[in-house]
């Protein structure tokens, strides 16, 4: 019997691949046998990230800005030129924006956050879906956030953008009805990462660092999550183990949004 969690020979495109969650996910997808197309706007960090992939992995790095339609079309074309198909698309690039209340939030940053987190995800869907629909199979996983499920002070724009990612995910899943293409999203909670530190520090400017027990006191699991724990859910959703899962928003948050 084939091992349904394996991804041998599948082609996985990962955006935001130079970041903490993108790198951890790309690593796990490669360990499970996938060929990797790593996409990020940070070229140097991207090269470093793909160097750490298992020696057996076939991988290409494509520098692209996910907000630019021509560059999105380019990374899709590069994936097809390199490997001939796209089986898995981890649509993950995102930014936190400023950490400030709405009354002090600049319109320019508002537009930038929506551009990366919503337009970037939309363009990825727009250009990858036709490839998968033509073949009648594929799995897309978008990165939302628990901030896409609940409100979050000082990151209202980020929260709005992630609510939009969940809306895009569910609508895309419905547009793929009876095609063999599945679309889901993952909603990470507080993951030990640069982005989380930026948000915590941004909420306490100029103050002493917030003690870790204070940070985790509202998480039933009483600890931060690891990028590898997000990767595990993405790799599951990418695989045939998730063959009946579409339109879902999976929380990876130690129970933070359960109450
Ligand atoms: N870290 C967390 O606690 C957390 C929690 C919930 C959701 N998320 C989401 O997970 C995803 C990954 O976050 P992370 O923690 O790895 O952050 P990160 O900052 O480490 O990684 C994000 C990556 O996206 C890339 N990127 C940003 N804008 C881009 C653009 N226009 N074009 C191409 N690449 C671009 C960055 O260069 C970076 O490498 C994001 O969508 C984020 O919103 C993170």
Image: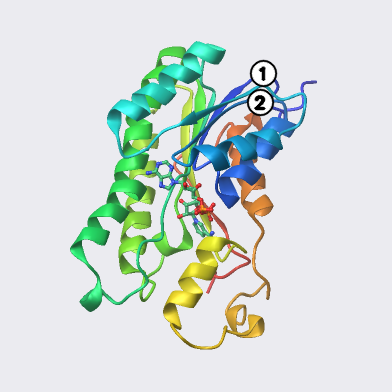
What is the CA distance from the residue labelled 2 to the residue labelled 1? 5 Å
Q: Position of residue 208 (x, y in %)?
A: 55, 88
How many numbered circles does the render carry?
2
**99 in relation to 226, above or below:** below
Asked whether the beta carbons under mark 2 and mark 1 sit within 8 Å of each other, the answer is: yes
How busy is the neighbourhood of tag 2: few (under 14 within 10 Å), some, or many (20 plus)?
many
From the viewer's side, name the closer residue of 105 and 160: 105
Q: Quadrant of the N terminus?
A: top right
Residue 9 bears which disc, if any? 1
Q: Quadrant of residue 75?
A: top left
Q: Residue furthest left?
A: 107
Residue 175 appears in the figure: no
Q: State which quadrant residue 32 falls in.
A: top right
**Foreground residue, 81 or 125?**
81
Residue at the image point whose x is 31% and y is 60% from the top: 160
Which numbered circle lies on residue 34?
2
Can residue 77 be seen by looking at this rendering?
yes
Q: Is residue 190 left or right of residue 142?
A: right
């Amino acid at each position: 019997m084939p091992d349904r969690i394996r991804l041998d020979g599948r082609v996985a495109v990962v955006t935001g691949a130079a970041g903490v969650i993108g790198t951890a996910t790309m690593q796990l997808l490669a360990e499970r046998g996938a060929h990797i197309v790593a996409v990020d706007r940070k070229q140097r960090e991207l090269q470093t990230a793909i160097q750490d992939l298992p020696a057996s992995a076939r991988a290409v790095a494509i520098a692209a800005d996910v907000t630019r339609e021509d560059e999105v079309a380019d990374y899709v074309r590069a994936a097809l030129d390199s490997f001939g198909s796209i089986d898995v698309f981890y649509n993950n690039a995102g930014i936190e924006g400023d950490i400030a209340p709405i009354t002090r939030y600049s319109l320019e940053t508002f537009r930038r956050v929506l551009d990366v987190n919503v337009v970037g995800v939309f363009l990825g869907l727009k250009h990858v879906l036709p490839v998968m629909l033509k073949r009648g199979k594929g799995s897309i996983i978008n990165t939302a956030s628990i901030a896409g499920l609940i409100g979050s002070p000082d990151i209202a724009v980020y929260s709005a953008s992630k609510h939009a990612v969940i809306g895009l995910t569910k609508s895309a899943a419905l547009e793929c009805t009876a095609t063999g293409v599945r679309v889901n999203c993952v909603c990470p909670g507080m993951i030990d990462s640069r982005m989380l530190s930026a948000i915590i520090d941004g909420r306490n400017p100029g103050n002493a660092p917030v003690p870790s027990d204070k940070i985790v006191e509202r998480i039933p699991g009483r600890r931060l999550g690891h990028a590898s724990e997000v990767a595990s859910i993405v790799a599951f959703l990418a695989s045939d183990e998730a063959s009946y899962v579409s339109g879902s928003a999976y929380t990876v948050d130690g129970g933070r949004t359960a109450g």
